[in-house]
Image: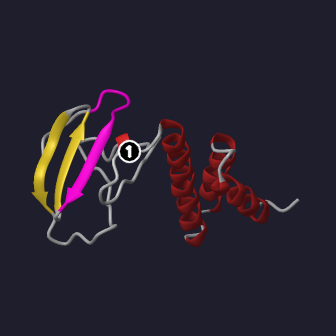
Amino acid sequence: MSNYRPKGESKISIEVKDSELTCKADNESLATNLPLDLYKPGEVLFGITGNQYGPKKISISEIAVLRGSQSSKGIQKNSKEAMTRERNARAKLQLAQSAIEEGLIVLAKKFLTDITNEYTDTSAAKEGRELLRTLSPE
């Protein structure tokens, strides 16, 4: 993989096909057909490596998962945006649930508050509000 240095927000695309990874960031190729010997369908690991100053924090603002023959061109814009918002909210909801399991209640509350404020129109936000109420009894 190349030594890519992001400048602010970056659009990253990751494709796994036939257990090989292709990754681009801001249209710069980072990896092409990189073999993933231990890859299982549906499994995605995303992370960073440390540097001389330690690991750098990352933030994922949007995520879309396309499977099989789906393509972003085949999904209408409004529908795609709604699906993306629901996926993003669900991803944060899963992070909140993991934080609760690990006893990180303050972190879980932050994720749940973010979901309810950012993704008010999603079913995940409704679940997040209910879970937040159980963590913050009145």
- In the image, is residue 45 above or below residue 7? below
Residue 19 in the image, given as x and y percentages of width and height: 17, 65
Q: Magenta span covers which residues?
A: 6-17
Is residue 125 among the parts visible in the rendering? yes
Callout 1 secondary element: helix
Residue 18 in the image, given as x and y percentages of width and height: 16, 64
Is residue 87 magenta-colored? no
| Quadrant of res 28 | top left
**For residue 106, side relative to residue 70 (left or right):** right
**For residue 44, side relative to residue 92 (left or right):** left
Residue visible at 30% across and 40% down in the picture: 12
**For residue 134, side relative to residue 97 (left or right):** right
| Quadrant of res 5 | top left
| Quadrant placement of the C terminus | bottom right
Residue visible at 26% across and 31% down in the picture: 26
- In the image, is residue 62 above or below residue 9? below
**Viewer-proximal residue among 128 and 54:** 128
Residue 109 in the image, given as x and y percentages of width and height: 66, 55
Residue 45 in the image, given as x and y percentages of width and height: 32, 60
**Viewer-proximal residue among 32 and 71:** 71
The amino acid on which the numbered mark 1 sits, given as a three-letter code, is Gly
Is residue 16 magenta-colored? yes
Circle 1 sits on which residue?
Answer: 74
- In the image, is residue 132 above or below residue 119? below
Residue visible at 79% across and 60% down in the picture: 133
